[in-house]
Image: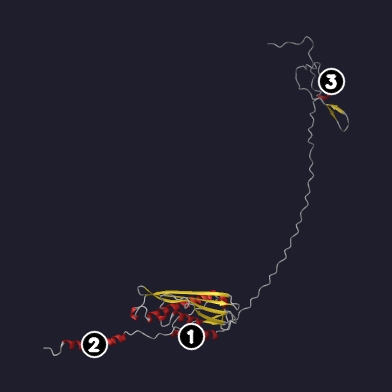
Amino acid sequence: MSLFSRPLRATCSVALLLPAFLAGCAGDKQPTKFAPLRYDYLSVMHLNAGTLEIEDATQQNPVAGDISANAPTPPAQALRQMAQDRLVAAGASGTAKFVIDQASILHNAGGVLVGQMAVHLVLLNSGGTQAARAEAHVSQTMRPDLSKGDADSPANLYELTSDMMQRMNVEFEYQVRNTMKDWMVDAGGTPVGSAIQSQSLDAPGAKSSTAAKSAAAAAAAATAPALATPAVTTPEVTTPTITTPAVTVPAITTPDVSVPDATPSATVPENAPNTDTASGSTKKTSTPSAKTSEPDPVFPAGEDDDSASSSTSASTPKVRSPEPGVLKLPKK
């Protein structure tokens, strides 16, 4: 027979195991305290405006199913803190208005968290007219770590908000320095141009290392010798005088060309008289007939003695016609 009954043994077992079970539950306890999200360790953007206004438009346009209010630091509160830490109105007039357009977290099917953030910054002149505008949008989807509790546990919502805010700081500064470069000033209100400075997005705990690097750089700049900017003298440009040389054109003399008389000379017949222009006398030039041994049928008695003496040599014998009755017929 057993010393203890079965119900009694079961009760004792529960009593012994209960402390161990409670200790295990205490070890899995979720964190209840979260560090506030601050951004004063990032670079400050000074705006040429007299005042800075921050407006939360999400209250007038709520999103159905939004669970961002359950986060340790709601997204809208984190965006407002970013504007307070990083925007400074350093001008004399005008208004810079920072508007939170969207800041929501939705718990979609499958345990997925979807976050949305949207802001814009406008600069208004003293008359209320918009002079410049910059916008920034960030969205992120996260599959929560169930080891930190439920999908919509504070730890998961805090992690999603922190991640989106890091991206928003980068996007917002980029948009402001690019679209509002003419409205950026330094702490004293002097325009600084459109240079974009790089800034580490480390956690606030790393602020000391960043500050140390900045201090070292400032000390090195203070000890470095000043560089004198050389004076640039613009040389005087003298325009040379262009003189056109005188061109002497030589006189062209046309040569005197004697053109011979093109009138053809008349053909003088053989028996034409020769006129001597110098003496004015006319001479008859006769060309002697071809010498032949046969009698001349025109002048059978031969040429006249006077004409023959002037045209032929004295040694040439005269040819006369034969006596009558002497002619003979040629033989066949």
- Calculate the distance from the C-alpha at mark 1 to the C-alpha at mark 2: 54 Å
- Picture coordinates of residue 255, whole percent (x, y): 78, 46
**Residue drawn at 30 percent across, 85 percent down:** 25
- The quarter of the picture where residue 269 lies is top right
For marks 3 and 1, the one nearer the N-term is 1
- Asked if one can make out residue 43 in the rendered structure from this viewpoint, the answer is no
- Picture coordinates of residue 302, whole percent (x, y): 81, 18
For marks 1 and 2, the one nearer the N-term is 2
Q: What element carries label 3?
A: helix
The residue where tag 2 is placed is 17
Neighbour class for label 1 at 10 Å: few (<14), some, many (≥20)? few
Amino acid bearing label 3: Asp
> Is residue 144 found left or right of 51 in the rendered image?
left
Which image quarter holds the C terminus?
top right
The residue where tag 1 is placed is 211
- Picture coordinates of residue 164, whole percent (x, y): 43, 77
* Viewer-nearest of discs 1 and 2: 2
The residue where tag 3 is placed is 305
